[in-house]
Amino acid sequence: MRIRSLGVIDDAVVELSPGFTAVTGETGAGKTMVVTSLGLLLGGRADAALVRIGAKSAVVEGRIRVPADASAMVRAEEAGAELDDGALLISRTVSAEGRSRAHLGGRSVPVGLLGELAEDLVAVHGQTDQQGLLKPARQRQALDRYAGDAVAVPLAKYVAAYKRFRAVSQELDEITTRARERAQEADLLRFGLEEIAAVEPRAGEDVELAAEAERLGHAEALASAATAAHGALAGNPEDPEGVDAGLLVGGAQRALDAVRSHDPALAGLAERLGEIGILLSDVAGELAGYADDLDADPLRLSAVEERRAALTQLTRKYGDSIDAVLAWAENSAARLIELDSDDDRIGELTAERDALRGELAGLAQALTDARAEAAERFAAAVTAELASLAMPHARVTIAIGQTDDPDGIEVGGRTVAYTSTGVDEVELLLAPHPGAPPRPIAKGASGGELSRVMLAVEVVFAGSDPVPTYLFDEVDAGVGGKAAVEVGRRLARLARSAQVVVVTHLPQVAAFADRQLLVEKTNDGSVTRSGVKVLEGEDRIRELSRMLAGQEDSETARAHAEELLAAARVEG
């Protein structure tokens, strides 16, 4: 991360390594600003008071590696974020006026999106800021992962049954609640089909009748034109002296036939005239037949118009043409069969829903039993961890309960609410000392105790509830001596499967870190780029000596520091 103008930090770069990173420094040096910076990168609340006095804005930039198949990466890509060498670049700016802007992978995004990503990327545990496992839903998810196949197998069966149950219930509700609408729809379809059936239209009939009506309406003019055209082509019997096209073409052909032997060109033209004569004869014959067959009966015209009117009534309601009307009728008949079969379908769906409800109840009970067994093992493991973290009398339990709901499913003799994950409400409870009633961990522990409880929980859940990064702020508050060593040891154990960042004032904890960062101020009270540095070798021993005795050059403190480091390496 690069941090600029945030609190006491002027401009500093924090390099967090894989494994366990301890952030140390004197009180007031700005260690907590590291936690605050990471919180801003992950959607934390922006506060103008965080901006360094005299600066226009505070800026935090971070580079985070996220597995390609992680949900956070999928969500980031959906938002248009681009990767930089396989990593996400995140930037958060807070102005002195309190305005906040966020960028992800080079794109401006809502701050809320960073918060969504944070749930899958970082588990933060601090004195006043607890996330992750404080949420009951996350506690249930973590317990399920901790239980493994014992819960995963019945859960998969339950989810499959739940999805089918919801689908059947939804379809049944739709059919029954829309019964009146569907009955009205069926009546309208039935009326339309009866109306169409009464007319008995044929495909294309409207087009045929329109052409016939046009012909009958102009029968006299058509007959007169056909007769005149026939006379012009074949002659008029009443005028034997008249000249017609056939006679003229015949004369022309005979004139050419007389000389066609002298020139092949004229012979070709004579043949073409012969063809014309044959064509004229054919056309004349058809014209004669047309005139003879033309029906000028006004009764037929009236019948055609009446039929067209009946068809028009159909096309006004059911389609632009008779073909469209017939298509509507075909689709409506199929829909009517579907609607008429609703009663049978309601019976089938009701029987299936009732059967699925019983199956769901049985699977939910199996799921509850599996979770209860896993919860006992988990509670015992966390309680054992707390005994080594200066909380020897604390006892952790997991309460698994259900909520009564008359519309739910019957489990254990009760009708309870259900979701896609079962009927169980899982809550982590803590009794910090004998005689204290178990309470939700967010209410049953002080700040320092809560961080240790979270550490114990995370250690137990490590591997079963994977989060890439864990951040602990003052997890060792109120702890010292042997308990502090145990805190360091467990943080190191957690770091085997995830990145762990700890802000600490205890050398026993810092000694277990794979990397130790020192935050120190300059003479003017600011933390500059060189004010956050990686401690190695002699520098790390000097810092551990300061943390042990307040004296970097004390030989006794140096010897103790070296001993701590050596012991941590052996145990690590």
Image: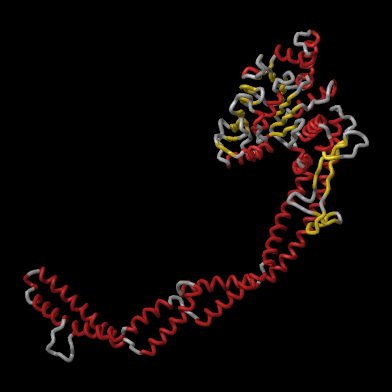
Q: Examine the rendered structure and indicate whether residue 457 appears above or below residue 257.
A: above
- The part of the image, by quadrant, that contains residue 350 is bottom right
| Colour convention of the picture | secondary structure
Q: What is the quadrant of the C terminus in the image?
A: top right
- The part of the image, by quadrant, that contains residue 94 is top right
Q: How many marks?
A: 0
| Image location of residue 295, percent across then percent down | 33, 87
Q: Is residue 561 left or right of residue 193?
A: right
Residue situated in front as seen by the camera: 169 or 130: 130
Asked if residue 320 shows in the view, the reply is yes
Outermost residue to the bottom = 238
Q: What is the quadrant of the N terminus in the image?
A: top right
Q: Examine the rendered structure and indicate whether residue 198 appears above or below residue 124.
A: below
Q: Residue at x 8, y 69 (%)?
A: 263
Q: Which residue is drawn at 82% across and 38% down?
A: 443
| Image location of residue 287, percent across then percent down | 26, 83
Q: Which residue is drawn at 42% across and 77% down?
A: 206
Residue situated in front as seen by the camera: 397 or 53: 53
Q: In this view, does 258 lie to the left or right of 36?
A: left
- The part of the image, by quadrant, that contains residue 552 is top right
Asked if residue 148 shows in the view, the reply is no
Q: Examine the rendered structure and indicate whether residue 71 appears above or below residue 314.
A: above
Q: Examine the rendered structure and indicate whether residue 405 appears above or below residue 49.
A: below
Residue situated in front as seen by the camera: 472 or 338: 472
| Image location of residue 557, percent across then percent down | 79, 11
Outermost residue to the right = 435
